[in-house]
Amino acid sequence: MRAAIIPALTRYTYAVWHRHTLVWRRLIWSSLTSNVIDPLIFLFAFGYGLGAIVDRIGGMDYLTFVVPGLMAHAIMFTASFEATISAYARFHLQRTWDAILATPVTLTELMSGEMLWAATKGMISTTCVLTVGWLWGGVPDPAGALLALPVLALGGICFASCALAATAHAKTWEFFAYFFTFWVTPMFVFSGVFFEVTRFPGFVQALAWFLPMTHLIAVVRPLTVGIPLDTWAALVHIAYLAALAAAAFALARRRFGRRMFD
Amino acid sequence: MQHARNEPVIEAEGLEKYYGTVHAVRGVSFTIPAGTCVGLLGPNGAGKTTTMRMIMGLSRPSAGRLRLFGAAPGALGRDLRSRIGLVPQEDNLDPDLSVRQNLEVYGRYFGIPAAEISERVPKLLEFMQLAERAEARVMQLSGGMKRRLIIARALIADPELVILDEPTTGLDPQARVLIWRRLLDLKRQGKTLLLTTHYMDEAQRLCDRIIIIDGGRVLDEGTPQDLIGRHVRGHVFEVMKPLPPGFDDDGIEREDIGDAVLYYTTDPTELRRRLPDEATYMHRTANLEDVFLRLTGRSLREGS
Ligand SMILES: Nc1ncnc2c1ncn2[C@@H]1O[C@H](COP(=O)(O)OP(=O)(O)O)[C@@H](O)[C@H]1O
Ligand SMILES: [Mg+2]
């Protein structure tokens, strides 16, 4: 009955996603440690430490400023890690992908399952950061923050898709050092997590706007802080995330198709 | 839904595969009728795994046609895939899951409803004698148990065709015998089996037909008896060198293997009569191994 209602694509993608949830539940403590405690340490260090030095930034106290940045960082880092290091282990080391492709699951469905799982795991981290940030008094507009969650989820889909595109090109583990140095770290420092992008010289700002993280934070921060957000600007940011996600996923699909079947 | 007996389940026609410049499979054709067990034999690097991966749709053929279950040739659709179970050469069990979960999760990949999965899994664990290890992690299993679990996994969707790539390589005799018994059970259930093995006794015991391939080409195919009759007559005499003077070996098929010569004959009495008394020799009935070595040569292969 349900099979008739839920399109097949969803069902087989869900099977892959479900496999990841089983493993996650089995390893729940170590999963929670890295994906939840990590961002909480950041929150504590920056909210408490830097907050004492930086009085106000962009017209708000530092904790309020940094909470949305750390929410975005949580999903960016978690989704990027899951869709590179972990996905590569399943693809290359454990040959889990090979096993799955010998079933009715198609490569596109398998990759969608990986991608959505990476985004899901990112959302778990982000939600924890939001909860603690809110309890701590760093979220003036809780309703706006809830509205930010779907945007963050789209961000997660985008980060996961970009990470999969990298994984599709990886030949060795060392490859991911480049990915983290030239992709993850710049999004950590240049996209407005800790201070405004406008503090950088013009060419750095121009580069920063290529990074999906910058667009994500540009939407999420006004929402959690409760300051006005220009609808058109928000739509442009969201469209950028969606377009990049689609392009990266298509690239990953093409590349993996060649690697798996040729 | 079950494919009618003797209808071809796999029809391969001129299959070829290039990996870059490596010509791994060079025009392989064969037909596998429903309900039979066919052995694909060949030395390492012959192209067995590549051929099986092409059948499974895990590797795109560079040329040739492949028809499964009589469907139009081309990409393997979802409905056809769900009728095939694969036991790959390399262990790709899910190390992050337990034995039971490996089967359950695999069942979901086939789109089997959860209720049906929970009904089948205990039966399969029982069938492959893994019930006591249901909650163990894959890492804790012995080689034989892992192989059995991979076979159980391949059976989760009750496939009509089971493809087994070296299902018993590296196992001890007890583990092999158990797997043989299970494969014979599957045959009895009417499933079609395609398997590779390096053990000729295994092939002779399980397979109705044998396809021998080497260098990406089919060298010959037939029933084990056909092949033995055709290539090594039925009796082998291994005569040590130097050959005794006055040994009249005219008209007897032979193969020089270095320190001895193999003679193949249908009439052992006649050959024994011709051999001088001082000859050192060994006589035995010919088997599939003789056929294999005769057809594929005796030099070592890659990875051997
Ligand atoms: N992914 C691959 N890339 C390049 N060459 C390969 C690949 N897989 C197999 N080969 C080559 O193709 C040939 C056939 O290999 P394979 O099908 O594994 O043989 P078998 O299973 O009979 O041992 C070998 O020469 C092997 O080295
Ligand atoms: Mg092989």
Image (cartoon, coloured by chain):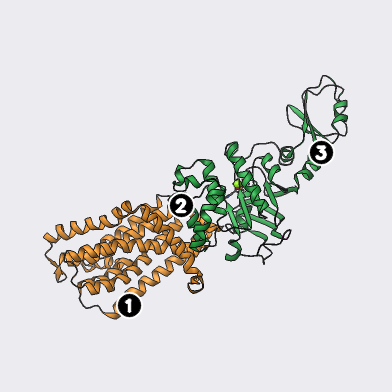
Which mark identifies residue B44?
none
Q: Find disc 3 in the rendering and name its residue.
A: B233
Q: Nearer the viewer, residue B10 or A157?
A: B10
Task: Specify the quadrant of the image occupied by residue A249.
Answer: bottom left
Measuring from the top left, give residue A112's x and y in whole percent: 45, 64
Magenta-colored span: B1-7
Q: CA distance from mark 1 to mark 2?
A: 37 Å
Label 2 Cα neighbours within 10 Å, binned few <14 / some 14-19 / many ≥20: few
- Please tell me if label 3 and label 2 are on a single chain: no
Q: Find disc 2 in the rendering and name its residue.
A: A171
Q: Nearer the viewer, residue A78 or B114?
A: B114
Which mark identifies residue A235?
1
Measuring from the top left, give residue A194's x and y in whole percent: 21, 63
Which hue is chain B drawn in? green
The label nearer to you, 3 versus 1, is: 3
Residue B123: tell me if it is visible: yes
Horizontally, residue B205 falls left or right of residue A62, namely: right
N-term-proximal mark, 1 vs 2:
2
**Chain letter corresponding to the colour orange:** A
Query: Secondary structure under badge 3?
Result: loop
Chain under callout 2: A
Q: Is mark 3 within 8 Å of ligand 1?
A: no
